Image (cartoon, coloured by chain):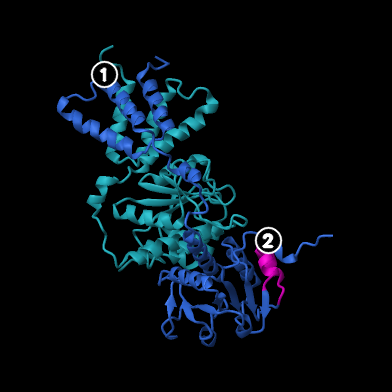
Chain colours: A blue, B cyan
């Protein structure tokens, strides 16, 4: 009889290389659950919880986590930050108190590059968040290697725990996707949905000639000295569209239709 | 006696260059307020609200916005997406339905680079979000120039409205801060030779309506079940050209000319 490991629930798409997320003395279960959701959006699944105020497990966290409950089920409960970081080689502390600590300060983007490089080298990395109300104590910040600071509007810095975790997870995945040689998400065919292969020049020229002929027959290019500029402007606008073979054919149909008689005449 | 303008409340740190955020038929006031908070974290303040389900102003939105209430107070209430985009030159639609629309698809990072470049050139840009439940309707997506898609874990894509707005605001600010040291490589005027500022959406919509009317009068869209695909394909091809205001005017002249009688008939 096969038994599904409990940990697999809701952890599809996990990125085993991604950093651990350490929550130090989190208060509201809802925030822990929201952080789990934010993490799983970008493939982060290794959560470590240090001395949560309301104990563990936490029903409010589970309710909020919804499809990301697997992150909570596999989370590690720790007595203190030392325990949470015991197997970690490199840790970043998230805090806005950057100056007084006299430690290196990274943005999410530079931190993500750094974490990827260190992970490549075999390091286990972690990002450490403080409690909702007070953030990280200085002694906790000092147990980390550098500070991670999110450059918000200095007049309105209001990120909550889950939003900070979301941005850091986003950055991890953004760099991860960008480091593959070819973008994994889209094949050439998919990319072509957005920007089709332009029609062969012969087709484009036939379209332009067809349009100009019909316009000429209606004196559009009169007076003669304006012809060049008018033709150029139309060509440039049409060329910029990068029309596919099918689109060029469609536009020829449009010209033919417009140049025909109105059905209600 | 000095009178504080109402709009200034809570808009400190506003980035006037930042794109507008358009919410189409948002449902929960709480989500509108949370989006306002997310925006202001990264200096975005131009919110436009299309047909909110629960009317406007909305007490739940105000309560949730907290210190970002100024974003709500200066938000523009619009009857439809056309009104919201009337003065916008370039709009991105946020949707996960990327394939079927056959439009260019950008990540937040590439979109942010693109929006900064276009804003440098003088374009007013916007990012369009659909309702919480259904997202954007196809017809709304087609009123935009490209699709913005956030590369989440395909097994757990659970971003809410405010989180999506947060990530896009973050990307805008990340690129903004990163560009400070490098002077612009080209002036707006130089850039405009290669890629003109697209016409305001009101002009583009008028062009499309003019074309479709003339085609309709000639039964181009018969049979009815092919109308949607035909309209979409024409729209997408025209939108890809990024027609300037002058070019849109020129094409209206072309349609009028073609739809008129041949001079040699």
Q: Position of residue B24 (x, y in %)?
A: 50, 48
Residue at coordinates 62% horizontally, 59% vertically from top-left? Answer: A13
- Is residue A30 or residue B65 the one in the foreground? A30
- Quadrant of residue B244 within the rendered picture: top left
- Is residue A184 or residue A242 the one in the foreground? A184
Which residue is labeled 2 in the image? A10
Q: Position of residue A235 (x, y in %)?
A: 28, 34
Which residue is labeled 1 in the image? A217
Numbered range of the magenta stretch: A56-75
Q: Chief secondary structure of the magenta span?
A: helix
Chain letter for the residue marked with disc 2 in the picture: A
Q: Are marks 2 and 1 on the same chain?
A: yes
Q: For marks 2 and 1, give the CA distance.
A: 66 Å
Chain letter for the residue marked with disc 1 in the picture: A
Residue at coordinates 24% horizontally, 46% vertically from top-left? Answer: B193
Mark 2 and mark 1 lie on one chain; the one further toward the N terminus is 2
- Quadrant of residue A226 within the rendered picture: top left
Secondary element at image label 1: loop
Q: Up-down: is B234 above or below A69?
A: above
- Is residue A58 or residue B195 the one in the foreground? B195
Neighbor class of circle 2 (other Cα within 10 Å; few <14, some 14-19, many 20+) is many
> In the picture provided, is B181 more to the left or to the right than A72?
left
Asked if the magenta segment contains residue B221, the reply would be no
- Is residue A236 or residue B235 the one in the foreground? A236
Q: Position of residue A218 (x, y in %)?
A: 26, 19
Q: Residue furthest left?
A: A225
> In the picture provided, is B241 more to the left or to the right than A122?
left
**Placement of the N terminus of chain B among the 4 image quadrants:** bottom left
Secondary element at image label 2: loop
């Amino acid at each position: 009889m096969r038994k599904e490991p409990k940990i697999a629930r809701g952890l599809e798409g996990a990125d085993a290389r991604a950093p651990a997320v350490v929550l130090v003395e989190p208060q509201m279960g809802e925030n822990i659950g929201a952080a789990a959701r934010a993490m799983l959006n970008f493939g982060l699944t290794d959560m470590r919880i240090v001395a949560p105020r309301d104990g563990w497990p936490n029903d409010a966290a589970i309710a909020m986590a919804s499809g990301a409950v697997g992150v909570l089920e596999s989370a590690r409960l720790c007595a203190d930050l030392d325990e949470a970081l015991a197997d970690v080689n490199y840790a970043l502390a998230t805090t806005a108190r950057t100056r007084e600590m006299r430690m290196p300060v990274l943005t999410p983007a530079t931190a993500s590059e750094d974490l990827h490089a260190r992970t490549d080298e075999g390091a286990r990395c972690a990002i450490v968040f403080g409690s909702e109300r007070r953030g990280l104590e200085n002694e906790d910040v000092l147990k980390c290697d550098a500070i991670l600071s999110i450059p918000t509007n200095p007049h309105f810095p209001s990120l909550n725990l889950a939003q900070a975790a979301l941005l850091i997870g986003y950055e991890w995945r953004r760099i991860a996707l960008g480091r593959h040689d070819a973008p994994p998400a889209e094949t050439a065919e998919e990319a072509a949905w957005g920007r089709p292969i332009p029609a062969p020049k012969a087709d484009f020229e036939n379209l332009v000639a067809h349009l100009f002929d019909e316009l000429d027959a209606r004196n559009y290019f009169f007076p003669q000295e304006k012809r060049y500029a008018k033709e150029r402007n139309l060509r440039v606008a049409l060329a910029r569209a990068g029309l596919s073979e099918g689109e060029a054919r469609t536009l020829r149909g449009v010209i033919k239709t417009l140049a025909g008689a109105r059905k209600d005449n």
